[in-house]
Image (tube, rainbow, N blue to C red):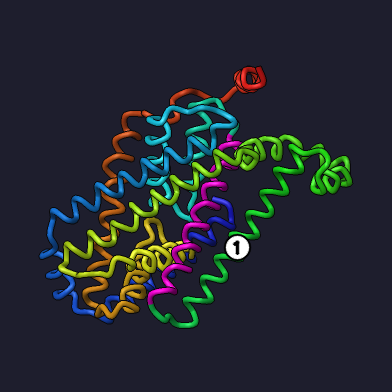
């Protein structure tokens, strides 16, 4: 493992260990175990079902983002998504994103850089949804300064990434754009070295030039995050917690911002801690909030283990062989025609 990913992995493990230590110091282990045992299995099973639906919607959206470059069967997208997110939860430094991109590129004979470009577009949609959740949650209750600051930072990151991707897209597909003119001023040696990787990556950004596809992907994103948010309500129901209907806005934002921080594989400790922080803003005591976090984590992990493990063992992803240049060129020529 290279030095940078190794450093992130070590930092993540240390942060997760610290989070687990702090959380367990605040609650009784016996009380925590009791609350987990007494949770309603029916509601938890339903929450797992919602998690699977959320991943199916994510796979559908991924296909729409990739559609200007390639049409990929939804079944292949779903299986690759499940295996990829299983890898994200088992490998350090979010290396599972690379697994997901490589697996789909290998099976569908698309350049890996192109698939990575589509994954970055996915993350832009997710950041936009979280920003919306943050803004809407502010309508329902006063929150501390750190919550508002984290929202502003998320907006800033999303805006900066969007502008950078748009400039890349414009520089590649619009020869009269400012980005294209700047690109032409780059040294010849740099342009020749980056031509292949940038061309591959920007192919995954072609959706930025398709307003109708972007709008439809945004609609799928809204539906996906509504389903994901409902999982919090179902886990609350399993514990007898009557969370307000708007609480998923708050919890989705807090949890997703927390897992952006380096942590151990599976986000152990960090995810539970974010649930404790989010629920504390709703007046839930630490013991019940930690039990909620553990149960919520299970509803996210178990579907990945079952479905991702099944698809990985059956080889129902990435089975198409390496993407040859001839195969890619043929596909691109077909798209032109």
Q: Identify the magenta region.
A: 112-140
Q: Can residue 10 be seen in this snapshot?
A: no
Percent of width and height locating residue 276? 32, 73
Residue at the spot 62% in from the left edge and 22% down from the top edge: 335
The foreground one among 95 and 248 is: 248
Residue 129 inside the magenta-drawn segment:
yes
Chief secondary structure of the magenta portion: helix
Is 295 drawn above or below residue 25 in the view shown?
Answer: above
Q: Quadrant of residue 305?
A: top left
The crowding category of the residue bearing disc 1, from other C-alpha atoms within 10 Å (few below 14, some 14 to 19, many at least 20), is few
Q: Quadrant of residue 32?
A: bottom left
Tell whether 330 sits left or right of 52: right
Is 259 drawn above or below residue 215 in the view shown?
Answer: below
Is 279 drawn above or below residue 77 in the view shown?
Answer: below
Q: Is mark 1 on a helix, strand or loop?
A: helix
Residue at the spot 39% in from the left edge and 63% down from the top edge: 252
Residue 246 inside the magenta-drawn segment:
no
The residue indicated by pointer 1 is 157
Residue at the spot 59% in from the left edge and 56% down from the top edge: 3
- The quadrant of the picture occupied by the C terminus is top right
Percent of width and height locating residue 149? 53, 76
Q: Quadrant of residue 325?
A: top right
Percent of width and height locating residue 121? 56, 47
Tell whether 293 sits left or right of 29: right
Q: Can residue 27 be seen in this snapshot?
A: yes
Percent of width and height locating residue 18? 39, 74
The foreground one among 183 and 175 is: 175
Please count the marks in the image.
1
């Amino acid at each position: 493992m290279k030095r940078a990913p190794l450093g992130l992995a070590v930092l993540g493990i240390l942060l997760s260990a610290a989070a687990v230590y702090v959380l367990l110091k605040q609650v009784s282990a016996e009380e925590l175990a009791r609350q987990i045992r007494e949770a309603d299995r029916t509601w938890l099973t339903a929450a797992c079902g919602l998690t699977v639906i959320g991943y199916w919607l994510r796979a559908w959206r991924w296909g729409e983002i990739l559609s200007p470059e390639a049409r990929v069967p939804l079944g292949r997208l779903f299986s690759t998504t499940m295996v990829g997110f299983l890898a994200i939860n088992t490998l350090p430094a979010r290396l599972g994103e690379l697994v997901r991109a490589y697996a789909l590129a290998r099976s569908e004979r698309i350049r890996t850089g192109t698939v990575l470009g589509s994954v970055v577009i996915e993350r832009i949609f997710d950041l936009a949804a979280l920003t919306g959740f943050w803004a809407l949650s502010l309508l329902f209750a006063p929150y501390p300064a750190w919550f508002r600051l984290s929202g502003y930072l998320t907006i800033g990151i999303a805006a900066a990434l969007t502008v950078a991707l748009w400039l890349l897209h414009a520089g590649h597909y619009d020869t009269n754009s400012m980005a294209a003119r700047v690109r032409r001023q780059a040294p010849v040696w740099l342009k020749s070295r980056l031509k292949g990787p940038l061309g591959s990556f920007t192919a995954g950004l072609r959706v930025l030039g398709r307003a109708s596809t972007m709008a439809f992907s945004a609609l799928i994103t809204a539906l996906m995050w509504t389903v994901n948010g409902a999982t919090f309500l179902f886990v609350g129901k399993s514990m007898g917690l009557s969370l307000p209907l708007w609480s998923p806005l708050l919890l989705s934002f807090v949890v997703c911002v927390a897992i952006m921080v380096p942590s151990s594989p599976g986000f152990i400790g960090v995810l539970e801690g974010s649930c404790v922080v989010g629920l504390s803003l709703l007046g839930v005591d630490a013991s019940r909030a930690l039990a909620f976090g553990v149960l919520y984590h299970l509803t996210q992990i178990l579907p990945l283990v079952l479905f991702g493990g099944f698809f990985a063992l059956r080889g129902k992803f990435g089975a198409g062989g390496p993407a040859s240049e001839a195969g890619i060129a043929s596909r691109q020529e077909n798209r032109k025609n």
